[in-house]
Amino acid sequence: MSQGRPEVIAGRLLQSVSDFAAIGATPAGGVNRQALSIEDRTARRLLAERALARGFTVFQDDAANLFIRREGRDATLAPLLIGSHLDSQPTGGRFDGALGTLCAFEVLEAFSDAGVETDRSIEIVAFTNEEGSRFSPGCMGSMAFCGAGRVEDWQADDPVFADELKATLQALPEAEIRPTGHVVSAFVELHIEQGPVLERENVPIGIVTGIQGTKWLEVTFSGEAAHAGTTPLAFRKDPMAAAAVAIARMQEEIMPADQEARLTIGRISTEPGSINVIPGRVAFTIDIRHPDAAALAAIERRVKEQCHAAGRRWGCDAAIRSRLDMPPARFAPSVTAVIADTCRSLDIRSRTMVSGAFHDALYVGRVAPSAMLFVPCRNGISHNEAEFVSDEHIVTGARVLLGVAQRLSQGQFHGSG
């Protein structure tokens, strides 16, 4: 077979992004395509049908991770894995996750158009439930892939998840179901930055060298419900007052003291939730992040100290439960170097950066050399229907991913770190 030069077909890729954005489209221009929903299954079917039409192999694993494989010439070599996810937030954007999956599919199409034979097989993956908006935890598919979580446990904990997982697997009967987890040579994930740095600096490609660590805590202050109008201050055990003090102190101290620290109070609830009753219970979540493990642990200790001090001040018990503890991840230099070399060869400006959000690559990086490349998004807005990536940046990202895949799919690549 004569081999040509593989090239990204811009019109085809941009139409593909538009086609998938129509699945679960919202009136405000975003998408609602939550994990294992009918909309998610529709997107998976469209991707599978396009893959089968090109002669690629389609299969799923027990976690409903969807794989598309283009065969290489040497079946003894572990395949290269590229891709991301297709699920979204309830009011998500059209690019988060889907862009990485569709750019990966464009890579396979470009190779096939040019008749290129790669040494390694190349597989696209659309991981299950990266977002974690409908089922918890997020990154379920990649966690199962690397052995960090068990599908059986999630099914046992959530019957709805078990039913929807079964329905999703059955919705693609032409895709063989294989055991979860198989050896890959490397993994590369293209994603929107979800931050303002690349746009602000007018840099089209971010080479992601790692992901900052994340801890999720759930804080519950338990006091004593009482009448709002008849209970003097001296008799109050007010968990809302304790929560307000703790939150204010955290916001005043944590991020102002460290520009790399992130602290977010994402959810708060009260019981009984009546306008004229002092709450008996107040609970809220804390998301803390930092690229350094020691600094992250120090922030967690300080947060706990502040919460316990606020509880004592207002006569309330403070219970703190860990919901997620994800250490910082460092991506493989052998893969980030290939991304940098590809950008130089294409005369595309790039910069290294650490991801503030976690992604499937964080987990896959535990079992295979992995890295990410970012493209800019307007104003850094993501998890929002206003999320936007320019056509130019979409095509540039796909061109870099294609060049990276060309290099990593050759037999001589043996990246180990």
Image (cartoon, rainbow, N blue to C red):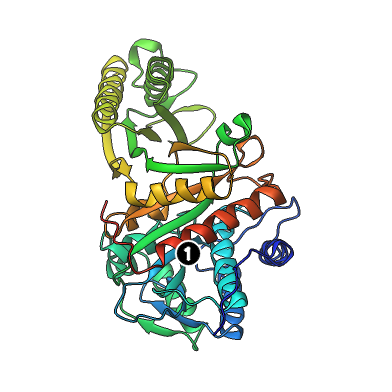
Toward which corner of the image does residue 76 lie, by quadrant? bottom left
Toward the front, the furthest residue is 2
Check disc 1: other Cα within 10 Å, few if <14, some if 14-19, many if 20+: many
Question: Where does residue 271 sit, x and y in percent of width and height?
Answer: 43, 37
Question: Where does residue 273 sit, x and y in percent of width and height?
Answer: 49, 36
Residue 30 appears in the rendering? yes
Disc 1 is placed on an element classified as: helix
Q: Residue at x 58, y 35 (%)?
A: 198
Toward the bottom, the furthest residue is 174
Which residue occupies the foreground of this view, 369 or 361?
369
Would residue 282 be found to the left or right of residue 275 on screen? left
Which residue occupies the foreground of this view, 123 or 76?
76
Toward which corner of the image does residue 259 lie, by quadrant? top left
Residue receiving disc 1: 406
Would residue 173 be found to the left or right of residue 316 on screen? right
Question: Where does residue 142 sit, x and y in percent of width and height?
Answer: 37, 61
Residue 332 appears in the rendering? no
Question: Where does residue 372 sit, x and y in percent of width and height?
Answer: 44, 50
